[in-house]
Image: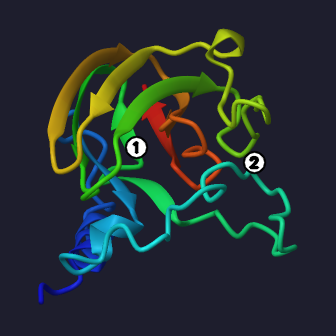
Amino acid sequence: MRPCAGALLISAVAATTTWAADEAATVRVALIDMSSAMPTGMTGYGMMGPGMMGQAPGSMSPGGSFGMMMGMMSIRADKPTVKAGTVTFDITNWSRSILHEMLIVPVDSPNAPLPYDYGRTQVPEEQIKVLGEAEDIQPSKSKTLEIRLPQGSYLLICNLPGHYSAGMVAPLTVTP
């Protein structure tokens, strides 16, 4: 059996968050879900079954447990801050079974929630500004996205149905 790769990845990403903003403008991004940390052969045991990814941010699950979905999926960036200019995102989907994507969304405050369509279980992209997107990142695959970012606050999100509400959001600050 393989060691818990997801936990090791999270530890490695967390250890690198002290990098200075003036270093190379490359941000390594990990798209993580429960299958990322499961031993081989554990996927498909109902953990991502019907209704699991349909919860809205902060909503009550049918069983009544508040915020049950938060944290089951996540986006982790190795740098919380970069300098304005061209930024390269090296994005890896660490999932073993789930497709993910990454959108870059400018925000006034990284703590304010984005608009949310409860019926579609997604952020309505027609109500936000998307500056860049890496779509359809297959499990265990990577994509690179290069974009010029001005100073400001941003959110990195996965906007596939239910993924934002399951915790796939990370702040990014761009400094002068």
34 versus 165 height, above or below? below
- State the mark number for residue 118: none
Q: Mark 2 — residue? A: 56
- Is 131 displayed left or right of 137 in the figure? right
Residue drawn 51% across the image and 49% down it: 168
Residue neighbourhood size for the residue with mark 2, other residues' Cα within 10 Å, grouped as few (<14), some (14–19), many (≥20)? many
Looking at the picture, how far across and down is residue 62, in whole percent?
83, 65
142 versus 93 height, above or below? above
- Res. 10 visible in picture: no
The residue nearer to you, when weighing 109 against 67, is 67
Q: What is the CA distance from the residue labelled 2 to the residue labelled 1?
A: 28 Å
Residue drawn 48% across the image and 22% down it: 151
**Mark nearer the N terminus (2 vs 1):** 2
**Do the numbered discs 2 and 1 sit on residues whose CB atoms are within 8 Å?**
no
Q: Secondary structure at mark 1?
A: strand
Residue drawn 25% across the image and 39% down it: 22
Q: Mark 1 — residue? A: 81
Looking at the picture, how far across and down is residue 37, in whole percent?
30, 74
Residue drawn 31% across the image and 29% down it: 136
Looking at the picture, how far across and down is residue 101, in whole percent?
38, 34
The image quadrant that residue 41 belongs to is: bottom left
Q: Secondary structure at mark 2?
A: loop
- The residue most toward the left is 1
Q: How many marks?
A: 2
Image quarter in which the N terminus is found: bottom left
